[in-house]
Amino acid sequence: MDLFALRNKIIGFLYRNLAKKIFFAIDPETIHDQTLLLGSFLGNNPLTRALTSLFFNYQNPTLRQKILGIDFKNPVGLAAGFDKNGIITRIIPNVGFGFMEIGSITAEPYAGNDTTKLTRLIKSRSLVVNYGLKNKGAEEISKRLKRENFKIPAGISIAKTNSPKTADVRAGIADYAKGCEKFIDIGNYFTINISCPNSFGGEPFTDSAKLDKLLA
Ligand SMILES: Cc1cc2nc3c(=O)[nH]c(=O)nc-3n(C[C@H](O)[C@H](O)[C@H](O)COP(=O)(O)O)c2cc1C
């Protein structure tokens, strides 16, 4: 067994038998927020970044791919929804991810749905997600991320602001455009999130004619 395999076995064992037990004893939204704070702290210091790499990172030239002009160091990325406000972009490369998707971000900020935002379904090993696109909004997030020099490709996931004001198709398209404009010079690609089920007005742009209008 090589050193990386041994390291990963130990980390996996510690995760299953220690970290996961602690995480699951805590409310899921609280532990999500705490993990983000820890990630932000670890990312702000070269020493903690190097230590994180020692525990989690892995590089191998055979994993590299160039797609649409973007260099990916490996094909495993962090999906949208974990780092909604882009506060852990400095540590994610050291955790071993090949790319990261920030958001989903909306043109206007949203504090999140009033009901419980995350519920664990332990038996089916899943989560019920009801954040409703909680995020600090395109203006604030883009201002902060403009100063960042991303070490791996970053996708910006833009969604429609969760509000009755964006329910109309025209207003919805204007809202997406407003969100995207703020990130023109930030990151490597956009993802357009058209399928947030727990937001106002449902998913109008999953209809192909409306999606064509949005993309145009
Ligand atoms: C807590 C949570 C929040 C999420 N928020 C978003 C989001 O804001 N935008 C989005 O496009 N997907 C969101 N997703 C979906 C994830 O990006 C991903 O597609 C999904 O979790 C499936 O990937 P997985 O099997 O690796 O978890 C969220 C998922 C979870 C669990």
Image: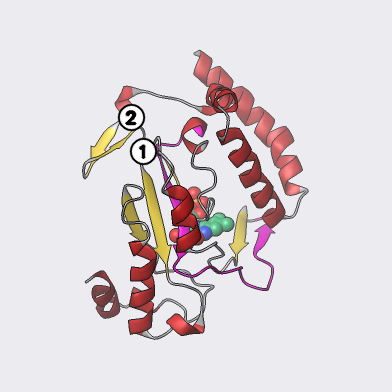
Residue at image position (30%, 25%) is: 62
Location of mark 1 (residue): 75
As helix, strand or loop, the secondary structure at mark 2 comes to helix
Relative image position of residue 164 (x, y in whole percent)? 50, 84
128 horizontally vs 206: left or right = right
Residue at image position (50%, 72%) is: 197
Q: Amino acid at mark 2?
A: Leu
Can residue 44 be seen? Answer: yes
Residue at image position (60%, 27%) is: 48
Instruction: State which region is magenta.
Output: 95-123
Is 101 in the magenta? yes
Position above or below: 31 against 57: below
Does the CB distance between marks 2 and 1 fall below 8 Å? Answer: yes
Residue at image position (53%, 50%) is: 83
The response on whether ligand 1 sits within 8 Å of label 1 is no
Is 105 in the magenta? yes
Relative image position of residue 91 (x, y in whole percent)? 52, 36
Q: CA distance from mark 2 to mark 1?
A: 7 Å
Relative image position of residue 140 (x, y in whole percent)? 50, 59
Q: Which mark is residue 63?
A: 2
Q: Which mark is residue 23?
A: none
Can residue 122 be seen? Answer: no
Along the line of sight, which residue is nearer the eye, 69 or 179? 179
